[in-house]
Image: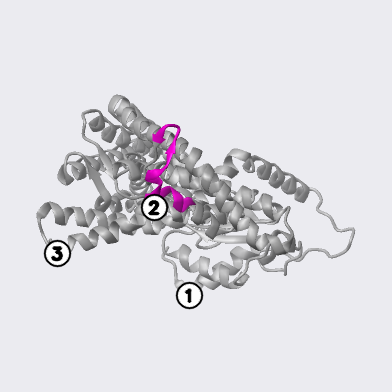
Amino acid sequence: MRHDPTTSPATATAILTLAGGPANVTSVTHCMTRLRLTVTDPAAVDGDGLRVLPGVLGVVGAGGPSVQVVLGPGVVGAVTAEVRNLIGDEPATAGTHTAHTEPTDAEPPRAESADAAPVGAELAVADLKERIRRRNATPAKTALRRIANVFVPLIPALIGCGILAGLNGLLLNAGWLPGLTPALTAVASAFMALIAVFVGYQAAKEFGGTPVLGGAVAAIVVYPGVAKVTAFGVQLTPGQGGVLGALAAALLATRVEKWCRGRLPGALDVLVTPTVTVLVSGLVTLYGLMYAAGVVATAIGMAASWLLSTTGALAGLVLGGLFLPLVMLGLHQALIPIHTTLIEQQGYTVLLPLLAMAGAGQVGGALAVYVRLRHDTGLRTTIRSALPAGLLGVGEPLIYGVSLPLGRPFVTACVGGAAGGAFIGFFAMLGDKVGATAIGPSGWALFPLLAGNRGPGVTAAIYGGGLLTAYAVGFAATWLFGLTRRPRTGAAA
């Protein structure tokens, strides 16, 4: 189903109503496929109603404080803009929530009398929502979601700069346009050189601090003058610790700022709080965090290299096979700091091509369903509309529209992803590394971002071979085991 942009206001209005109304929403963001809403009262969110809205491909996190509505690429940007317009320039804060919303077709009018209360089935639904909310509000899941929120806004710049870096590399290798390549190098590399500042800004914003103070402290990580500082007997180098050091510095700055603001009167707060925040956090960053983050970042790089060089096929099988469940749960964004760290260290992340095989396995599985169920017109229409996005690595339309509702094809798609990951991992064991210079795209869209140690031709061939393997195994596994019992017509439509 193609999305008509003129329906964005209606879609946004329905989503906002089912999310508990404007007063229940405290923040609105989006990634490539998902509208992300942070809500004050998770119990006010009608997850079932959201799932059946036309144009909604799935809902993640209903019952928790962070609700993700899967809309697909292109659509999500338009709907997000409309949601922001409906809320206003300043979304409601936690203190402004009211339980009452205007009745709509999606939500029947509620009784206003004081003795009105849910009974029977309504009590069971309320109890289920509360249990889901508690399950999704674990400290680990909440921390992963918030860290992901720091990096998600940076993805467009990572994609753009990564593609330009790949183009510049081709021009340099071919010896073409020598007068242009220095300019392209500057354009493609500037963001990565200063990414620590953006991470610090976003981290402070996400965790309740002043964004510019987080950016100011994180800027210390990349400042050239740190080369004159010695910590633990070792001379620091600009960029040491990378995005991990910047993230830690900004989190510390936020804690220091909040501590100061709770103890100083307004007249002193304006001058003292920023000064103390930058001073204390800056010194701790220089004499502790940069060194510690550098050790962790180095360990991540060494672990990734060791994993692929010694257990590449097994590692690829596991990563490719388990990535779809991570996407389904929305936890795949937690890998962004690891990808970014590897890109900073090695120039590319060797994990992303392995993980991209999960989407390819799902494409193969969806094709098997399409061929096998010739008379299920609704399901075939869903597959035709979702396949283009799937080929480009956007997996949510196929997850929530096809494989997950059918059940078994989701498992067989994971088998295809595992096979593709094992294919690429096998070549990594032979010394042929395949990586991506940026994060975000997947599937066929990842080809412009590929990099490795054997040249662009070999790298593209290995990655393409992995895609074909995942397609073929996903198709075969779904054909043989995914549809042993015919689903009801229209079940996934």
Residue 209 picture location, percent across and down: 60, 55
**Circle number at residue 394:** 2
Neighbours of disc 1 within 10 Å: few (<14), some (14-19), many (20+): few
Q: Of the residues tagged 1 and 3, which is closer to the observer? A: 3
- Segment colored magenta: 218-234
The answer to whether 473 appears left or right of 401 in the picture is left
Q: Does label 3 or label 2 sit earlier along the sequence?
A: 3
Q: Does label 1 or label 2 sit earlier along the sequence?
A: 1
In this orientation, which residue lies closer to the viewer: 134 or 485? 134
Mark 3, residue position: 179
In this orientation, which residue lies closer to the viewer: 19 or 279? 279
Report, in whole angstroms, how far the alpha carbon at label 1 lies from the one at label 3: 45 Å
Neighbours of disc 3 within 10 Å: few (<14), some (14-19), many (20+): few
Report, in whole angstroms, how far the alpha carbon at label 3 lies from the one at label 2: 37 Å
Q: Residue at x 73, y 66 (%)?
A: 101
Q: Is there a contact, CB below 8 Å, between mark 1 and mark 2? A: no
Q: Of the residues tagged 1 and 2, which is closer to the observer? A: 2
Residue 17 picture location, percent across and down: 65, 65
Q: Of the residues tagged 3 and 2, which is closer to the observer? A: 3
The answer to whether 205 appears left or right of 380 in the picture is right
Report, in whole angstroms, how far the alpha carbon at label 1 lies from the one at label 2: 23 Å
Q: Residue at x 17, y 54 (%)?
A: 170
Residue 184 picture location, percent across and down: 23, 61
The answer to whether 96 appears left or right of 209 in the picture is right
Q: Does label 1 or label 3 sit earlier along the sequence?
A: 1
| Residue 328 located within the stretch drawn in magenta | no
Q: Residue furthest top?
A: 310
Q: Residue at x 55, y 67 (%)?
A: 11
Q: Amino acid at mark 1?
A: Thr
Residue 160 to residue 249: above or below:
below
| Residue 226 located within the stretch drawn in magenta | yes
**Can you tell which quarter of the image residue 73 is in?**
bottom left
